[in-house]
Image: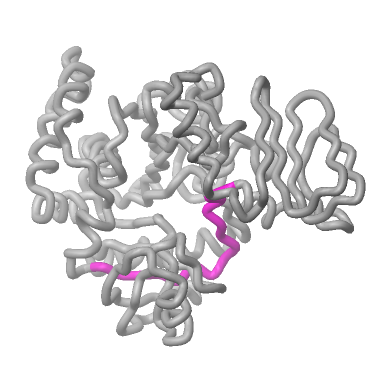
Amino acid sequence: MNNLYTLIMAGGSGTRFWPRSKTVKPKQYLNLSGHESLLQSTIKRFSTFTEPENIYVVSGKSQATVLEEQTPMLPKANLIYEPVGKNTLPCIGLAAMFTEKENPHGVMVVTPSDHLIGNDERFRDTILAAVKIAEDRDGIVTIGIIPTYPATGYGYVQVESEIEAYNNVNRFKVRRFVEKPCRKIAAEYLSQGGFYWNSGLFIFKINVFLEAVRQFAPALYNNLRKIQEEIGNPSFEHTLESVYQTVENISIDYGIMEFAENIYLVEGDFVWNDLGSWESVYLTSEKDENGNAGSGEKVIVDSKNSYIYSETGLIALVGMDDVIVVQDGNTTLVCKRDKAEEIKKVVDQLKAKNKNQYL
């Protein structure tokens, strides 16, 4: 499928996965659910239907060393470094400028680098069903995950008319994108039906996407064109650095998906978890008879439903339930499982106190 391209967004900092996730090796480069890192698993998954030379990765300069170490299967020219993180729309737009120069008629699949996905065959069928819409209807397509509980950490997508299924995958026209709701509203969405979790996966023709950027984010479009003109020239790095600093920090949801008319959703009926915190890692991990999970040397006494990770040495847990314990180098985290989302506050405090040796 030489007309199909994959963009993997790998520039996140993963602060909720401190202390394992550090500045030089954030969450997406960690092996949280197997022997491969999340990024390597993502590349492997998409390589089943995308040629390696058509897989691009966008990351930050601080991650260049670990990114190159983990991606020997990709051309180095396909590793794109943002001077500064500017959210998903500039990130996708920057990669689209590279791919358009190679193939302006290509179709791009955009994916985060850090999701846990099961049933790869069904996932492939779902992506190809979305590609079909992108090609036949000039659609910008998102993958919607069937909600299983009233989650407040995800955005939602409401669908309206259903269109013909493809590969036995349900496909819909989108009515609207919805912000992350409170629990009461999320429960109403589940009761009402017709709502899906926003997975952060997008599929579109490159020229269709760039036309949407030109229409809805013209300043960004003009800046991206300035950058594209310099690709391959000695002045490229300087132009990228200077121009990219000025672009708006905006997501594809806010910048494009909430305004465009040609938006579709394909139902993602496969195992999916965005691994947003240590709690989600615990929930997706294999557990012992007492509900404990993790890896590394550990001794557990009279403790249940906990996650323990030890990089070096031994962790002993005695008489504690529902906790997360993670030891990595010179840092150790201990927290209640229901407080896992607040770990980023530790990172904020360490930054405020200039304790960069722990970051």
- The image quadrant that residue 62 belongs to is top left
Residue 103 visible somewhere in the drawing = no
Q: Is residue 100 in sight in this rendering?
A: yes
Q: Which residue occupies 66% across, 20% down?
A: 330
Report x, y in % for residue 358.
56, 22
Position of residue 311 measured from the top left corner of the image (x, y, whole percent): 73, 28
Left or right side of 146 for 156: left
Indicate whether 284 appears above or below 149.
above
**Residue range (magenta):** 263-277
User: Of residues 96 and 156, which is closer to you in this image?
Assistant: 156
Where is 38 relative to 174, above or below? above
Q: Position of residue 192 (x, y in %)?
A: 42, 87
Query: Which residue sits furthest bottom?
Result: 192
- The picture places residue 181, in percent across and down from the top left corner, at 39, 68
Q: Residue at x 14, y 32 (%)?
A: 246
Task: Specify the quadrant of the image occupied by residue 63.
Answer: top left
| Left or right of 280, for residue 110 | left
- Give me the residue at 49% from left, 19% from top: 356
* Near-viewer residue (85 or 146): 85
Q: What's the colour scheme?
A: one colour
Name the residue at 10% across, 50% down. Answer: 214
Q: Quadrant of residue 154?
A: bottom left
Nearer to me, 19 or 94: 19
Q: Is residue 175 left or right of residue 342?
A: left
Check if residue 158 falls in the magenta segment: no
